[in-house]
Amino acid sequence: MSSRLKHGAMETRMTDSPLITIPDSFLSSGEEDWFKAVDAALKGADRSRLTGASEDGFPIAPIYKRRADTAPQTGRSAGTPWTVIQRVDLPDPKDANAQILEDLNGGAGGMELVFASSTVSDGNGIRVNTLSDLEQLLDGVLLDLVTIRIGAGHEWAPMLAMFAAHLKKTGIDPKTISLNAGWDPLGWNAQRGEYWFSREMVSARICDAVVALDEIGCATRVLEPDGRTWHNAGASQAEELACVMAAGIEYLRLLDKGLPAQAAPHNRIGFTLAADADQIGTIAKARAARRLWAAILEQSGLEQSPMRLHMQSSYRMLTTQDPWVNLLRNTVAAFSAGVGGADTVAILPFTGSIGLPDGFARRLSRNTQSILIEESNLHMVADPSAGSGAIEARTEELVAAAWSMLQEIEKEGGLFKALVAGKVQNRIADTAAARGEKIARRVRPITGVSEFPDLAEKPVHVLPNKAQDVELSDARRELPLPASDGRFLKAKIAAYLDGADICELITIGNANSAPVGTMEKLHPVRDAVPFEDLRAQANAHKAESGQAPILFLACLGSLSEFTARATWTKNAFAAGGLETQGGEPVENLEALVAAFSESGAKMACLVSSDRVYAEQAVDAAKALKDAGASHLYLAGKPGDLKDALQEAGIDTFLYAGGNLLMLLREAHTRLGLGLMGDNVIALEGRS
């Protein structure tokens, strides 16, 4: 039995009659045999055609050898499942409480309380302003049995104080609580493009909170470098790791200034990373994070302590169109986070990019993880990917690339100074632009959006946002400034117990009327948004005019000659919300022109095989132009016929690898889409 398996967790029996007989030829084949077969299939082409590249530029080989020289990484132990975390973000505390209880009873082991002030609230978030609101939110929740993550953004300290006041009022022993405050000040600065406190004030506020919480026995990781901030803005995996580690170093320095040496500042820091549908990349990213943090602790002279790692499925990868595909994306993300060794994992409901998820979407989110744990038993092996050639290679490459970028950031004086200089934001923007170009050309396709779109899809159900403005007090309470004895947070706790609301607890230290300074702002956006905007424009046009935007498919030749390319072309235009008419075989050009005229379309696309194009495309193009086609496309690369086709009236060639997004935007402009009434669609900017 492997030493990485918990005793009694698994039993393997070998028999003389295996269920599957593996051919001897398979068992005796080696790498060279595989390459011989590959060379035969390539028919003289270079093997390099089979090697891809990751977003960070790492080569992705077609085959990897087992790495027998590696050992399992230290992390979550064998037999210990990760904790299933559910995001809670319904605005009304009573509704959110029902959500919490349903999730906990349905298999979740913890919750992320996403308040309205959170950087990942996406326009939603719980509205909690008084201690009574929090009591309503947590009614019936056994806090000593669950993991609690607070997502409150810049209101982290008021919410943390309110939570501590709740523990004191209810008599719950703080020592029994697993709490994470989740404050990432540098990530918040980068998202907002501004900072409101000096470095000294930030350090004082954080250390004040740590001391106050220690005094009441509440072991809390106050700081949380959050990879979602950088990931959602377009960062690659190595860039996300570098930014998170750079933030971790900054926070060690902030804590070191105000805490005694024995306070173990590294144990006040947790980490969050994004998990997406890149299975090998996500597993490797989680493993690389632990190696990087261990190296930082070693270089800092701090005692080694296991990283506390939380992972959440990527918001950037979710789509609003054909959202059912999000279930598949989320499953890969959950699998990868679990195998990668995350301690806690949250999976966004598949409708999370559309609106507030209902109970059905949340249940699927929970059950995805429960199945991976309870039925697939992914947790029974410690670091199950250890020894995988592909994953070990990617892990090492990510460590090296992230460490290199981290050194560049440190040369700037740390992450804060690098952000003020704009170098981190510019690098991430370049990465996002390169990814956007691949998405536009469908080199990086998005299923259900840029590939295989369904123009007849039915909307999925989401909950209405019932958030209401709450009348808050204009009064301000006199509170002490943050200090090394925790007086600032203690005073807030006392104020909540005395009936204060959150707006009363503004002190001179955070009552600035303007930011202390500014920096380049990050621009988070989901990958699918550019194509989704086109679909939204087309839908708005249809709703207002009663007529869907259409394009005529002018198919030449027989069905067997044009069907494959016609299907591809139809899907390409559907990615922009354009419906197609035609697509049927015709007897002659007169019939083709008649069908075009009857369709009412302004634009047409010639579709057939290259052989038929050589014989009929020029005449067909002239006939359609004479019939009034305002713009004429041809599906496929023109080759030697380009000049003749353009002279005959072909305006644009549509082919695999071309910039489909630009082509569709130009088509929208020609059709006047997005210009009707108030239905101009703006790019999404949610995180």
Image (cartoon, helix red, strand yellow):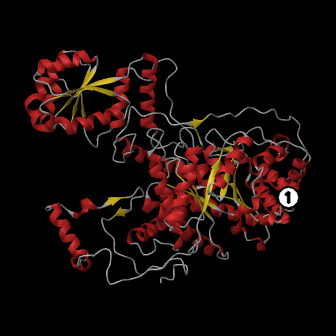
Please give the residue where the numbered disc 1 appears in the rendered image.
483
Q: Is residue 139 visible?
A: yes
Work out whether residue 284 or residue 175 is closer to the camera in this orientation and state it: 175
- Residue at x-position 54% and y-position 71%: 291
Picture coordinates of residue 232, whole percent (x, y): 53, 48
- Residue at x-position 50% and y-position 63%: 285
Q: Secondary structure at mark 1?
A: loop
423 to 569, vertically: above or below: below
Q: What is the quadrant of the C terminus in the image?
A: top right
Work out whether residue 159 or residue 241 is closer to the camera in this orientation and state it: 159
**Which residue appears farthest toward the left when viewing the image?**
615
Q: Is residue 236 visible?
A: no
Work out whether residue 585 or residue 73 is closer to the camera in this orientation and state it: 585
- Residue at x-position 56% and y-position 48%: 422
Picture coordinates of residue 474, whole percent (x, y): 86, 34
Question: Amino acid under label 1?
Answer: Ala
Determine which quarter of the picture holds residue 37: bottom left
621 to 454, vertically: above or below: above
Q: Is the residue marked by circle 1 packed among few (<14), some (14-19), or many (20+) residues within 10 Å? A: many
- Residue at x-position 22% and y-position 64%: 47
Picture coordinates of residue 356, whole percent (x, y): 60, 39
